[in-house]
Image: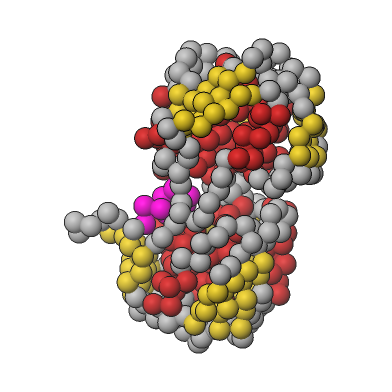
Amino acid sequence: MDRIVVRGNGPLNGKISISGAKNACLTLMPATLLSEEPLTLTNAPRLSDIRTMTTLLRSLGAEVQTMQDGKVIAMSSHQADNHVADYDIVRKMRASNLVLGPLLARHGHAVVSLPGGCAIGARPMDIHISALEAMGAEIELKDGYLHAKTSGGLKGADITLRFASVGATENTVMAATLAKGTTVLRNAAREPEIVDLVECLRKMGAEIEGEGTDTITIQGVDRLHGATHPVVADRIETGTYMLAPAIAGGEVELIGGRIDLLGAFCEKLDACGIDVTETPTGLIVRRRNGRVNAVNVVTEIFPGFPTDLQAQMMAVMCTAEGVSVLEERIFENRFMHAPELIRMGAHIDVHGGTATVTGVDKLKGAQVMATDLRASVSLILAALGAEGETVVNRVYHLDRGYERVEDKLSAVGAHIERVSEDE
């Protein structure tokens, strides 16, 4: 099993290219199941989760080819004839559940295992199920699988989600594109990844309005056709690398980064004493002075502060001036990185969904363990500004969401390397 070794060595300077968004790409790929014609995605990230979704789609009978070193994914579902998403694949990644809506819409039945993914709290499927049932689906849970079918196809409905779930919004929108009649989805999630999905579906012939707001209206059509679509830039990767110079110092330009996808996050950076400047090709990030200022953070659904940047922000707060309080409102059990940061000398007190961080002058390198995707990169960030050597173990989580992180950070001067267990 690989591990990442980081030696804190001062300021970072240079450029980092931002990849296409993992969460957007994982949503766009199942859209191929809605059409017999080819769907091609450009600016795709090269990640293990993308390979897992590729394996799942192929198991359903879709043709999936990667080109240009994995940055282009060409798909066709004209011969997709299997409607069972098997546990052995689905358990590896929660986004696998996004095949449910497309399979049900196009074929009228689907059998999908309950999903897996990072152990950061319960993320139940009941919101997905209730939305699809409102459209006429009959869904039964048997032996860990959702058995779904329709009588005469899905039908448009007026649906209000009890929580603005991203996954449920995506599943429902995709299913509704081929439903009979009009679907109005209320309390819909507003994330940029959903806007990206709708833009792609519209290119495929879908009739959708309201993406980016809490009410999305979908007029069902008889069929969707093929399209080519670029994956939106990864706002979580962007936010993560914005924090690298905040911790280590220096000035980093993020090529392809977009401030408009990170409004609430950028407001906190400004309060911390971190300057973010837009450029024609991305954005530049630098600290204004020495230590950053402590700020309080509350994670919220978009457009609030992203839960997927909470762990990384905690790493910054560990050496901030003052005391910060981070409140996690999206997922329970998402402070598993705190004990590892404490091993590096951080002062963190966790009570339920709240973590109080008292800044220290400097963290110290240590052996630490990655517990989930975002926790793993938070430990790497912390190590960039720490004294001595930090070894981050169990970094297989990292490869699910960050493309070649050691190469990108090395390019701006970080002393970081990946070491195999047998080395």
- 210 above or below 371? above
Q: Quadrant of residue 140?
A: top right
Total numbered badges shown on the rendered structure: 0
Give the dominant element type of the magenta stretch: helix, strand or loop: helix
Q: Position of residue 412 (x, y in %)?
A: 48, 64
Where does the image place residue 355, in percent across and percent down from the top left? 57, 74
Does the magenta segment cover residue 315?
no
Quadrant of residue 204 within the rendered picture: top right
- Residue 355 lies, with reference to residue 206, above or below; the image says below
Q: Position of residue 152 (x, y in %)?
A: 66, 12
Q: Is residue 323 visible?
A: yes
Q: Is residue 127 left or right of residue 97?
A: right
Q: Residue furthest left?
A: 422
Which residue: 69% across, 47% down? 163
Query: Over which residues does the magenta segment extend?
Result: 395-402
Relative side of 65 to 304, left or right = left
Question: Residue at (71%, 59%) from the top-left corner?
Answer: 304
Q: Please tell me whether residue 397 belongs to the stretch shown in magenta.
A: yes
From the viewer's side, name the closer residue of 299 and 251.
299
Q: Residue at x 27, y 54 (%)?
A: 1
Seen from the viewer's position, the closer of residues 353 and 289 is 353
